[in-house]
Amino acid sequence: VTVLVGAHHAGIPIVGVMTYPFSKQQIWGVCYEGHSVTNVHRPTINSPIKTVFVSNLETETRRDKMRSQGYHVETPTGAGFKLGGVILGTASFYYVSKKRLGLPDNISTCEN
């Protein structure tokens, strides 16, 4: 379970918080006027992460395509858990082929 909260100014995301209420863990970030700060400390990665998160509704054809490119495909439950995994470096990306109910319309990132 995750709780996702974000705020935007003029359609541009400026702050986001992801809370895991049962573990009390939080991920947060702010990006405004070219400045950004987050509580996420990314580890040094010596080799590419070859894991991708997908929905359990994703077709086997798409999963096979990712496997053929050398990716390990995982299907954890919950969009928040998948997004958190990408933010924390557990997965390279979260693949979504179709707009689904409950998934944010867009997912934005902010980097310096």
Image (cartoon, rainbow, N blue to C red):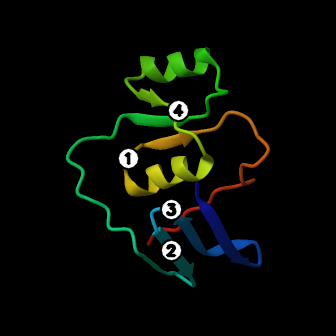
Do labels 1 and 2 touch, CB within 8 Å? no
Residue indicated by mark 3: 22
Q: Which mark is residue 56?
A: none
At x 40%, y 35%, the residue is 51
Dot 1 surroundings within 10 Å: few (below 14), some, or many (20 or more)? some
Rendered-image quadrant of the C terminus:
bottom left
Relative to 95, say whether 15 is above or below: below
Q: Nearer the viewer, mark 4 or mark 3?
A: 3
At which x and y percent is residue 10? 77, 78
Residue indicated by mark 1: 90
At which x and y percent is residue 9? 73, 80
Q: Which mark is residue 75?
A: 4
Q: Nearer the viewer, mark 4 or mark 2?
A: 4
Relative to 92, say whether 23 is above or below: below
Dot 3 surroundings within 10 Å: few (below 14), some, or many (20 or more)? few
C-alpha gap between disc 1 and disc 2: 18 Å
Mark 1 and mark 2 lie on one chain; the one further toward the N terminus is: 2
At which x and y percent is residue 59? 64, 20
Query: Image quarter for residue 92?
Result: top left
Task: Say which amino acid is labelled 1.
Answer: Thr
Mark 1 and mark 4 lie on one chain; the one further toward the N terminus is: 4
At x 49%, y 43%, the residue is 93
Task: Say which amino acid is labelled 2.
Answer: Gly
Mark 4 and mark 2 lie on one chain; the one further toward the N terminus is: 2
**Which element type, helix, strand or loop, lies under badge 2?**
strand
Relative to 53, say whether 79 is above or below: below
Query: Image quarter for residue 78?
Result: top right
Task: Say which amino acid is labelled 3.
Answer: Phe
C-alpha gap between disc 3 and disc 1: 20 Å
